[in-house]
Amino acid sequence: MEWFGATEYWTSRLVFQKGLAALYLVAFLAAALQFRALIGERGMLPVPRFVARVPVRRSPSLFHLHYSDRFFAGCAWAGCAVAAALLAGVDTLVPLWAAMLLWLVPWGLYLSIVNVGQTWYAFGWESLLLEVGFLGVFLGNDEVAPPVVVLFLLRWVLFRVEFGAGLIKVRGDECWRRLTCLYFHHETQPMPGPLSWFFHHLPKPLHRAEAAANHVTQLVVPFLLFAPQPVASVAAALMIVTQLWLVLSGNFAWLNWITIVLALPAVAWPSDPPPVGDAPLWYVVVVLAVSALLLALSYAPVRNMLSRRQVMNRSFDPLHLVNTYGAFGTVGRVRHEVVLEGTADEVPREDSDWREYEFKGKPGDPKRWPRQYAPYHLRLDWLMWFAALSPAYASPWFGGLVERLLENDPDTLRLLRRSPFPADAPPRHIRARLFRYRFTTWRELRETGACWERTYVREFLPPTRLAGSARKP
């Protein structure tokens, strides 16, 4: 069955599988290190409470069968171990069926996590990792040539990622149509990186050129993925260059990296593949059946993509097999940040000794330069950006965060860069204030050493203490 396999994409499959395994490893590591404070038994949005009210058919997950923090940690660390084994190439040392089962394990484990992760896992790159990871199960190992139909489906995912993002932009904020969105984006994006300040200060004509190039890359180039080689390779290379530009300009978890990984199989890499026999009949049948299913499930995402009421980052099935994507349909013009402060004073006053909590990734101290964290995902930092946009975004979990800071909860404090209070002396009161942040100018940076300038806007949360505490004002 020579029509079924594409031996010339042997190296393409190899680099794709290595990249996918590495991203699985990052995703499971983030889950293992952050879950207790976010969705653990004493977390802000506990999994046991979620599975008690949401049926398994709406959120298929192992944790409907059993949940404990120890069991969740075991699943997350098992995911890390399997991802590391796949990265090391264990799938090439076992029979085809066993390799497929190995790739199915991290997909199943991560699906179980995402489906109980609630708002902490409501990001497009979670569904994208699951959709791409499911396709990775059927790419095969060294026993067979890469299946043509799976390589096509990977390009189909990449097309929807890029074209959907392009459509949401031109339909959304008028600044994309005027090519002015990048006047603001680098300053107002969720989590700036170490180079974002410099990107923000690029000349405006270059910002306009960036926006125009983005439209070309997302609205025109994706169609070239289905052209013959070397055109498809050139299209994929253009997308990779664009994504690397985004990697340099901000922190978007693994969104840019998984898009790069998706583009790799479209490139015709020079290779000298070993000879392989025909694919087993059972393998051909399984791959074709799954491919037919995925193409049928593509109807809803395509209908959404073509709709004038297009929505971003939506899953249309509980297994996240085929989804719709998009980013920055609207770009903020002003950056706001929620700053959390605590005091040990019995009676909180404006002139009390208020000490600021420092987060790892989100802006805080104006003199602290942004760090590079992507592809690692700081979930609390990202949700704090949404909280600054509107308190409604934070209503399910913000009160729980404040409560745990008042308790000096160790799991919650590990999500922060620094707590201003000793472990044995928690604050008496916590307050939250909203500030407007902007990048300083070149002159301000030289004079003050600060990359941010911030201005107080309003109170976000008044001084709050633990309910029922004996330490009353």
Image (tube, rainbow, N blue to C red):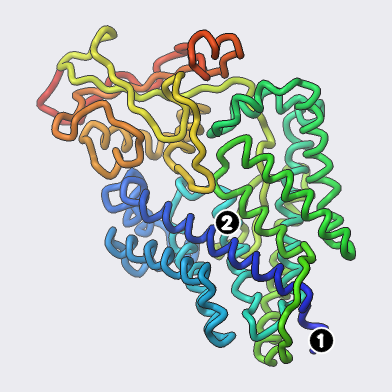
> In the rendered structure, which disc, 2 or 1, sits on the residue that comes first in sequence?
1
- Name the residue type under label 2: Ser
Q: Position of residue 412 (x, y in %)?
A: 30, 41
User: In the image, is 9 to the left or to the right of 129?
Assistant: right
Q: Look at the numbered disc 2 and give the secondary structure of its residue.
A: helix
Residue at the spot of label 2: 127
Q: Is residue 265 left or right of residue 468?
A: right
Quadrant assignment for the N terminus: bottom right
Among the 4 quarters of the image, the one containing residue 444: top right
Q: How many marks?
A: 2
Q: How many residues crowd mark 2 within 10 Å: few (<14), some (14–19), many (20+)?
A: many
Label 1, residues with CA under 10 Å away: few <14, some 14-19, many ≥20 = few
The one nearer the camera, 79 or 195, is 195
Which residue does the image show at 73% across and 42% down from the upper left? 309
The CA span between labels 2 and 1 is: 33 Å
Q: Where does the C terminus fall, quadrant-wise?
A: top left
Instruction: Indicate the position of residue 265 as horizontal and vertical percent values.
Output: 72, 65
* The disc label shown at residue 2, or none: 1
Mark nearest the camera among 2 and 1 is 1
**Residue drawn 33% across the image and 43% down it:** 44
Q: Residue at x 40, y 23 (%)?
A: 339
Q: Nearer the viewer, residue 307 or 220?
A: 220
Q: Which residue of the protein is positioned furthest toward the left in this rendering?
A: 470
Q: Position of residue 23 (x, y in %)?
A: 54, 58
Secondary element under disc 1, as helix, strand or loop, is loop
Q: Quadrant of residue 272?
A: bottom right
Q: Residue at x 56, y 87 (%)?
A: 95
Q: Position of residue 75 (x, y in %)?
A: 37, 65
What residue type is disc 1 on?
Glu
Labels 2 & 1 near each other (Cβ < 8 A): no
Q: Quadrant of residue 50?
A: bottom left
Disc assigned to residue 243: none
